[in-house]
Image (cartoon, grey):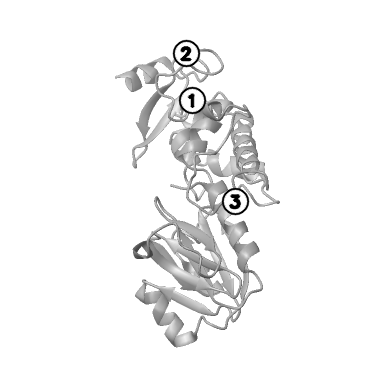
Amino acid sequence: MPEGDTIFRAARTLNRALAGEPIIRFESVFATLTRVDEDRGIVGRTVEKVEARGKWILMYFSGGLVLLTHMLMRGSWHIYRPGERWRLPHSRMRIMLGTEPLVAVAFNLQIAEFHTEDSLRRRRGFSALGPSLLTSDFDEEEGARRMLAFGSQEVGEVLLKQSVVAGIGNVFKSEVCFTCRVHPFRKVSSLSQHEARTLMKVARAYLQANVTDTSWNRIVTYSGMRRTTSRSNPEERLWVYKRNGEPCRRCGALIRCAKQGPDARVTFWCPDCQTLEPELEQRNAG
């Protein structure tokens, strides 16, 4: 699933391409969207702005309409010149928004809805989002407080809760825990206030580093270019993610992995750099 940095870059590029432009063509395979177009008209409206909140993209139109989309595992937005050949087949198109200079195409989306500001506030799964790590006013203390409220759960699980802070996905979960030397299977209740703040600080720093104008900026789902190590070799761009059985870049111990949480997301860690209580270590090993 695309993480907060990917969504932020997609929204930023959509905003640069579409903001201030009137829509001259609209298509969608979603009946609920085409019904809104028939009843209220999308063509003729101007795109006011596009922004990201966590893993959601919001496209604001004149007249108070907001298009809310989520990429889930396979979705992506592409930008094309009029008449330019699409890189994916038309059968995968879910939404097409045409302006005079550019065309925005959403492929393989499963969630796409028109809202007003009022209905957005009631939208389940969106209204409960925690503060976004990529907002300029993100408060690390508040993020830590929200995380520590889930004391009985494991650190790796809670980092993925978008209701705690929005933007962390499975890659950053493992990378942040490694950088902070926190075992992802530790109980949140075992964290100090300082450790919780550090997790928030590092998570934000990693997301920010991956949304700079010099970072990977094409509108596609996760492209494999995410980086956390600052090493120049692309093969050494991540600390632990998807490196099970390979030597730790810090200490040389072999990276381990295990499924975690109700969704059984795979988590990676170094057993030497990220220590855990012996009895829980034995349980995980079994």
- Dot 1 corresponds to which residue? 183
Q: In the rendered image, which quarter is residue 264 located in?
A: top left
Residue 253 marker: 2
**Does 157 appear above or below 111?**
above
**Does 59 appear above or below 198?**
below
Q: Residues within 10 Å of mark 1 (few under 14, many from 20)?
A: many
Q: Nearer the viewer, residue 142 or 157?
A: 157
| Residue 145 appears in the rendering | yes
Q: In the rendered image, which quarter is residue 112 located in?
A: bottom left
- Looking at the rendered structure, the secondary structure element under dot 2 is loop
Q: Quadrant of the C terminus?
A: top left
- Looking at the rendered structure, the secondary structure element under dot 3 is loop
Q: Residues within 10 Å of mark 2 (few under 14, many from 20)?
A: some
Residue occupying image coordinates x 34% and y 22%: 284
| Kind of residue indicated by mark 1 | His
Q: Which mark is in front, 3 or 2?
A: 2
- Dot 3 corresponds to which residue? 132
Residue occupying image coordinates x 38% and y 76%: 32
| Kind of residue indicated by mark 3 | Ser
User: Where does residue 144 sit, x and y in percent of width and height?
Assistant: 60, 40
The CA distance from mark 1 to mark 3 is 24 Å
Q: In the rendered image, which quarter is residue 194 located in?
A: top right
